[in-house]
Image: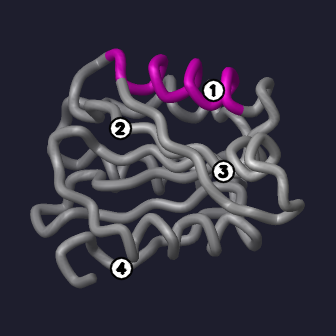
Amino acid sequence: MHATENENTNGSLREWMQRRAIENVALSDRSAGERVTMLVRDRIANGSERVVITNADREVPRGLVDHAFDALRYSGLVCAPDADGAIALLGMTEPLAELFARVPWEASDALEQLLSAARQDRVSVLLLPPANRL
């Protein structure tokens, strides 16, 4: 796993690096939800306010990542599909362990299942444009 962080709001490099976190993770197997939850918990504990997870199996344009960080100002969870409907990107401001535990990450309709579970839990979600459109 490789992490890159950015956003210069207070001038210091350390604060700049801790405000936003980007992680690249495989999102298509059973343990994806646990990995995402652990990464988000760790990043939030280390001072990040917004965390974006990109699917290691997909190419996600930089513009979509920037869009996700902006969208996290208004919603606790953002998602973007890929051309085939798989999850290309997730963004959040807090760990969503219970929600992610109910998602069948290896299923072809994982994004639909995630959105349905979020509605049931009354979690605010913003659906971003597909990764292949940016």
Tell me: residue 88, above or below residue 38: below
List x then y, in percent, for residue 36.
49, 28
Mark with earlier residue (4, 2): 2
> Circle 3: is it few (<14), some (14-19), or many (20+) Cα within 10 Å?
many
Amino acid under disc 1:
Glu
Amino acid under disc 2:
Asn
Amino acid under disc 3:
Arg
Amino acid under disc 4:
Pro
Start and end of the magenta stretch? 31-43
Decide: marks 4, 2 in contact (CB < 8 A)?
A: no
Single out the mark in the foreground, 1 or 2.
2
| Left or right placement of residue 123 versus residue 90 in this view | right
> Circle 1: is it few (<14), some (14-19), or many (20+) Cα within 10 Å?
few
| Residue on which disc 1 sits | 98
List x then y, in percent, for residue 95.
68, 33
Q: Check residue 20 in the rendering and tell me which mark sits there, or answer none.
A: 3
Q: CA distance from mark 3 to mark 1?
A: 23 Å
Chief SS of the magenta region = helix
Tell me: residue 123, above or below residue 126: above
Q: Name the residue at 36% across, 68% down.
A: 62
SS label for mark 4: loop
> Circle 4: is it few (<14), some (14-19), or many (20+) Cα within 10 Å?
some
Is 20 in front, or is 80? 20
Is 90 in front, or is 20? 20
